[in-house]
Amino acid sequence: MHVFIDTNVFLSFYHLTNEDLEELEKLVVLIKNNQITLHLPNQVIDETRRNRDIKIKDKFEALKNEKFTLTFPAYCKGYEDYKLLRIAQKECEKHHANMIKKIEEDINNHALEADTLIKNLFEKGNIIERTSKIIAKAKERADIGNPPGKNNSLGDAINWESLLISVPNEENFCIVSDDKDFYSPLNSNNLNDFLLEEWKTKKDNPPNFYRKLSDFFKSHFPNINLATCSVPRFSGMDYNETI
């Protein structure tokens, strides 16, 4: 199975997401077990790296400045629970300060769990170099107004042209992206109709589209179990590997 993970999906693990980091771990296991090929345009790697700090800063500053403040009327002070709450408040402040210190160190050392998993995926993916031919095709898409793309940026178009070159014909292909330039304005759970028709014309087999990694796994690898490192093959065969 061939898979493309868009930049916004990787970056969501540095920001706010309902997804768990375990979803990235599943990808690592599946690639290691040769059950999926991750197609990784060089454009995605660059976009992820250059936007990492921006995504982290956006929510980390709010977390760092969070205050555990409780305001009590004077008549609360005679209650035992008041004393316990004050103790709990001080404990929260201490653990918060310790966590912030550790997180800052990991951010600076690129040692967040998301950093480690994404780096692992980037090392294992099938990297598609951003050639002059791909850039020229992406510019042509933008000039004539074909999706994907926005705000005079060629990034999405470069990724699409990279995939058209890299993914083999008639292969089972899945796209995971939460970018509005990829999904249909009529139904955000479907691939943009223009892109779908183009892919079917050039590659014969229509791609599956998902906005979340968890939806991709539910559809194709519902029984993956990281606790035992047991990953039933997509074909239905059992396959075990210890990592």
Image: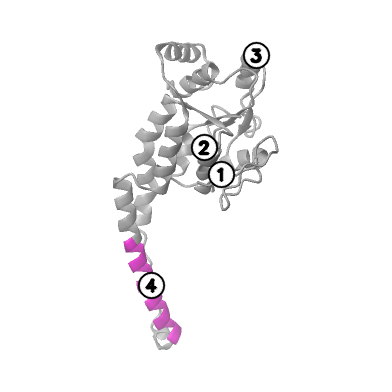
> Alpha carbon of mark 1 to alpha carbon of mark 2: how far?
9 Å
The label nearer to you, 3 versus 1, is 1
> Alpha carbon of mark 4 to alpha carbon of mark 1: how far?
45 Å
| Left or right: where 160 falls relative to 112 | right
* Mark 1, secondary structure of its residue: loop
Q: Quadrant of residue 182?
A: top right
Q: Position of residue 202 (x, y in %)?
A: 62, 13
> Alpha carbon of mark 2 to alpha carbon of mark 3: how far?
32 Å
Mark 4, other Cα within 10 Å: few <14 / some 14–19 / many ≥20: some
Magenta-colored span: 80-98
Residue 208 shows which numbered tag? none
The label nearer to you, 1 versus 2, is 1
Q: Is residue 97 magenta?
A: yes
Mark 2, other Cα within 10 Å: few <14 / some 14–19 / many ≥20: some
* Residue labelled with disc 3: 201
Q: Amino acid at mark 3?
A: Thr
* Residue labelled with disc 4: 89
Q: Which one is in front, 47 or 187? A: 47
Q: Position of residue 196 (x, y in %)?
A: 63, 21
* Mark 2, secondary structure of its residue: helix
Relative to 127, say whether 143 is above or below: above
**Upstream in the sequence, badge 4 or badge 1?**
4
The label nearer to you, 2 versus 4, is 2
Mark 1, other Cα within 10 Å: few <14 / some 14–19 / many ≥20: few
> Alpha carbon of mark 2 to alpha carbon of mark 4: how far?
45 Å
**Upstream in the sequence, badge 1 or badge 2?**
2
Residue 32 shows which numbered tag? 2
* Residue labelled with disc 1: 241
Q: Which one is in front, 63 or 202? A: 202
- Residue pushed farthest right? 236
